[in-house]
Image (cartoon, rainbow, N blue to C red):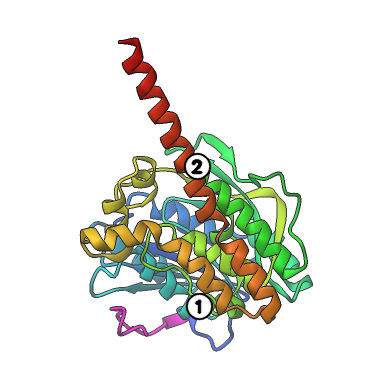
Amino acid sequence: MSERLGFVRSDRGASDNGVAPAVTIGLPVYNGGELVARAIESVLAQTCGDLELVISDNCSTDSTPEVCKAYARRDPRVVYRKTDRNVGAAANHSRLVHLARGKYFKWISHDDWMEPGFIEACLPVGEANPDAITVAPIVDVVDPRGKKLQSVTSYTGRSGWSERRLDQFREMMDELTYCDTHADGLLMIAYLYGMHRTGLLRRTRLLMPFISSDHVLAAELSLFGRLVEIDRPLSSFTLGTSQHGTTANFTAWNPAAIQRQLSGTHPGRLQLFFSVRRRHAEYVAAVLRSPLPARDKVLAALAATRPARARLASRATWNRNNRASRLRESGAK
């Protein structure tokens, strides 16, 4: 797997003492040298120190390698890896899960940070809920200056997740339907950047190289394990700090740039067409490969089409209103 994705192997060094840490923090980075130190410092400042930080550098050309290697030399918990080619952001994120030694896993972006008590708060919740796949604290979304823009919470007014897996999936599809019809997918940040049970996370398809594959991962998380929320903010997500991230391009809606960052290649028109729409088919595929009983799979598959149906209805309404507006304007003339 690692060789196929362009991963350069090297010794684990001082961090490999034969004892697996409780938590692996995975930091995927590409040309994040100006900000990555803050993210690393927030990991190393955790009040629960039973962790490893694995950095996957996607062939950066700036100061990223020097910054990360310096931390790896100083702290045996830091493991630095670099690809031999740009494999894209999706593969770079997913590789970290396969490199993890910890029972639990969390992603952190190079321009984000964790509160010192993140692991200390999440770890007991995971241990108390053996069927939990993700423990998700609230995430504060901030601008590049650190000013809070919003806190990520339920769009639908949901208070907690159902313990029944089919109902939990339906609730997730309600949230994803809102994302599809309101052009706001920030809720998925809480689940992408929560603390995951590594063994269950590996049963999902992780992040895939198409637009909004994080929505599909959220759907799979709700199928393969229990989602548990922590009702307080324990990490921050920075919106649009870097031309090398996808958030700025999502805000400006530049799908070609997003796809190029996700896959590491320049997309053709057909690839781009399917990338924008692929998530709807993947929701159904997630249901079919899930551990749900056959009867529940039928009901879940129907729920999986809800975002696509809502989007089509929303588009039809917009077209009708647009035509009516043009008719009124032409009549006024």
Residues drawn in magenta: 1-14
Q: Is residue 237 left or right of residue 89?
A: right
Q: What element carries label 1?
A: loop
Q: Nearer the viewer, mark 1 or mark 2?
A: 2
Q: How crowded is mark 2: few (under 14 residues within 10 Å), some or many (20 or more)?
A: some
Q: Earlier in the sequence, mark 1 or mark 2?
A: 1
Occupied quadrant, residue 117? bottom right
Q: Quadrant of the C terminus?
A: top left
Q: Is residue 52 something that shows in the picture? A: no
Q: In this view, does 218 lie above or below 137?
A: below
Is 270 left, or right, of 161 in this rendering? left
Q: Position of residue 133 (x, y in %)?
A: 65, 71
Q: Is residue 327 above or below residue 51?
A: above
Magenta segment, prevailing SS (helix, strand or loop): loop
Examine the rendered structure and indicate whether residue 328 appears above or below residue 270.
above
Give the amino acid type for the residue marked by disc 1 in the picture. Ala
The structure residue drawn at horizontal position 33% and vertical position 83%, both measured from the top left corner, is: 9
Image side of residue 95 versus residue 228, left or right? left
Q: Name the residue under label 1.
A: 100
Q: Quadrant of the N terminus?
A: bottom left
> Which residue is found at the position 69% from the left and 74% from the top?
296
Identify the residue position indicated by label 2 in the image.
314
Q: Where is residue 16 in the image (x, y as percent from the top left)?
A: 49, 84
Q: Residue at x 50, y 40 (%)?
A: 142
Q: Can residue 137 be seen in this view?
A: yes
Residue 134 vs residue 319, the one in the foreground: 319
